[in-house]
C-alpha cells in the first residue's frame, strides 16, 4: 500500500518546522515593512503563506492517513 511508504511521524516533524518557519517569516515581514522595504516584506509574506499552506497540507495528509488506517478492517481470505 502507498501509505506505508510514508513515515507519518517524520511528516509531522516537517509540519512543526514549517509552523515555526511561518511565524519567523511573519515576524521578519513585519520588521521589513516597518523598516521601509515593502517589496521585501511582501516577498516574505508570500513565503510565509507558502509555508502555512504546506504545513496545512501535510497535517491534513497525516490526519487522513491515520484515520483511514484506523478505519480499515482486517481482511480475511476465505477459500471458496
Image: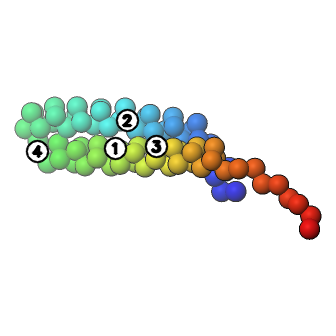
Say whether residue 56 is left or right of residue 3.
Answer: left
First of labels 3, 2 by sequence position? 2
Q: Residues within 10 Å of mark 1 (few under 14, many from 20)?
A: some
Q: Residue 15: image x %, image y %?
A: 45, 39
Looking at the image, can residue 6 be seen?
Answer: no
Mark 3 residue element: helix
First of labels 4, 1 by sequence position? 4
- Tell me the mark number nearer the camera, choosing from 4 and 2: 2
First of labels 4, 2 by sequence position? 2
Residue located beneath label 3 in the image: 59
Task: Look at the numbered discs 3 and 2 and tell me whether their residues touch, using CB distance below 8 Å.
Answer: no
Q: Residues within 10 Å of mark 2 (few under 14, many from 20)?
A: some
Looking at the image, can residue 65 be seen?
Answer: yes
Q: CA distance from mark 4 to mark 1?
A: 21 Å
- Tell me the mark number nearer the camera, choosing from 3 and 4: 3
First of labels 3, 4 by sequence position? 4
Mark 1 residue element: helix
Q: Residue 45: image x %, image y %?
A: 22, 44
Q: Which mark is residue 38?
A: 4
Residue farthest along the right direction in this orientation: 79
Q: Residue 55: image x %, image y %?
A: 41, 43
Say whether residue 44 is left or right of residue 32.
Answer: right
Task: Look at the numbered discs 2 and 1 and tell me whether their residues touch, using CB distance below 8 Å.
Answer: yes
The answer to which of 1 and 18 lies nearer the viewer is: 1
Residue displayed at 39% across by 45% down: 56
First of labels 1, 3 by sequence position? 1
Residue located beneath label 1 in the image: 52
The answer to which of 52 and 66 lies nearer the viewer is: 66
- Tell me the mark number nearer the camera, choosing from 1 and 3: 3
Which quadrant of the rendered structure holds the C terminus? Answer: bottom right
Residue located beneath label 2 in the image: 19
Say whether residue 31 is left or right of residue 11.
Answer: left
Amino acid at each position: 500500500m502507498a501509505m506505508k511508504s510514508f513515515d507519518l511521524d517524520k511528516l509531522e516533524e516537517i509540519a512543526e518546522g514549517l509552523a515555526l518557519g511561518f511565524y519567523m517569516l511573519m515576524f521578519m515581514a513585519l520588521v521589513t515593512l516597518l523598516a521601509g522595504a515593502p517589496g521585501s516584506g511582501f516577498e516574505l509574506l508570500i513565503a510565509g503563506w507558502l509555508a502555512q499552506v504546506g504545513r496545512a497540507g501535510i497535517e491534513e495528509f497525516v490526519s487522513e492517513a491515520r484515520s483511514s488506517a484506523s478505519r480499515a478492517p482486517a481482511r480475511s481470505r476465505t477459500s471458496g
